[in-house]
Amino acid sequence: MGKSRFRLIAAGLVAFGLVLSSCFTIRVIGVSPKALSPGGTAKVTVKLYRASSGTDTTTRVVLLIGLTDLDFGTVSLFDKKGNFGGPFARVSDNAARDVMLTAGQCTVSGVAASDIAGAFDEWRAFRTIAVVDSSTNLLSKVFKVTFDVDRAASTSNSSFGSYVVFSAGWSDDGDGVPETGEFICTSITSGSVAFQP
């Protein structure tokens, strides 16, 4: 899928979740500010919640993020409010990213990460170092993560930057190496940040 085609549907794509053997799904995402001047930075807040009381797991929590005309800034600790034993240290994991962008490895509500990979300039996967037990708090409690995005250089004031976020759990087989079949993608959301002078 090309960038122009994805941009047509990006604004309308809201958070979708799968009730599988999984830990958390995205329910809310917010961006502040809503528009960026040249050199500006926005904070994207991702709020995840337990999928259900019957699908709790103990896995590493993963966010796969794609950006177009935006650059990655600072990424917070996972579970910033400490509702599930955090805050948890996180790492950027290129091996996890590569597996999740492989065909058949990360599909949510009919949207495959591999199918939209070319619609974004840059992809990164961030994950907890430790495993997280999603059963340790109420369904109403948030698992919060934030990340900053910077407006890319040489972008037009009449355009916008796009992002997409997949949430997942990594059920490692014990060797500490991301491999096919180990990621359960649970939800997807996307949006855009307008550019202004």
Image (cartoon, rainbow, N blue to C red):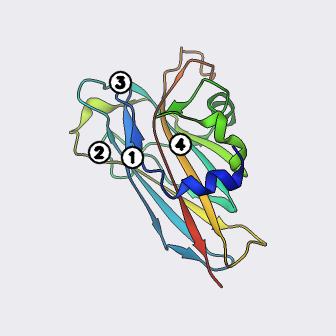
Q: Are marks 2 and 1 in contact (CB under 8 Å)?
A: yes
Please tell me in which quadrant of the rendered image residue 75 appears: bottom right
Tell me the distance, in whole angstroms, between the alpha carbons under discs 3 and 1: 16 Å
Residue 99, percent across and down? Answer: 65, 27
Depth order, front residue of 105/47: 105
- Rendered image: mark on residue 57: 3
Q: Nearer the viewer, residue 70 or 89?
A: 70
Residue at the disc numbered 2: 83
* Rendering coords of residue 1 (x, y %): 69, 43
In this rendering, the answer to whether 174 lies above or below 84 is above
**Is tag 3's residue or tag 4's residue first in the polypeptide sequence?**
3
Q: Residues within 10 Å of mark 1 (few under 14, many from 20)?
A: many
Q: Residue at x 39, y 46 (%)?
A: 79
Q: Is residue 6 left or right of residue 13?
A: right
The type of residue carrying mark 4 is Arg
Give the CA distance from mark 3 to mark 4. 19 Å
| Label 3, residues with CA under 10 Å away: few <14, some 14-19, many ≥20 | some
For label 1, the residue is 79
Query: Which residue is drawn at the image coordinates 54% and 15% (left, top)?
Result: 174
- Give the distance between the C-alpha atoms of the residues marked 2 and 3, in whole angstroms: 16 Å
**Nearer the observer, disc 2 or disc 3?**
3
Say which quarter of the image contains residue 71. Answer: bottom right
Residue at label 4? 90
* x and y percentages locating residue 163 in the rendered image: 58, 55
In the displayed structure, 158 sits above or below 30; it is: below
Q: Residues within 10 Å of mark 4 (few under 14, many from 20)?
A: some
- Mark toward the start of the polypeptide (2 vs 3): 3
Mark 3 or mark 1: which comes first in sequence?
A: 3
Which one is in front in this view, the residue at disc 3 or the one at disc 4?
Answer: 3
SS at badge 1: loop
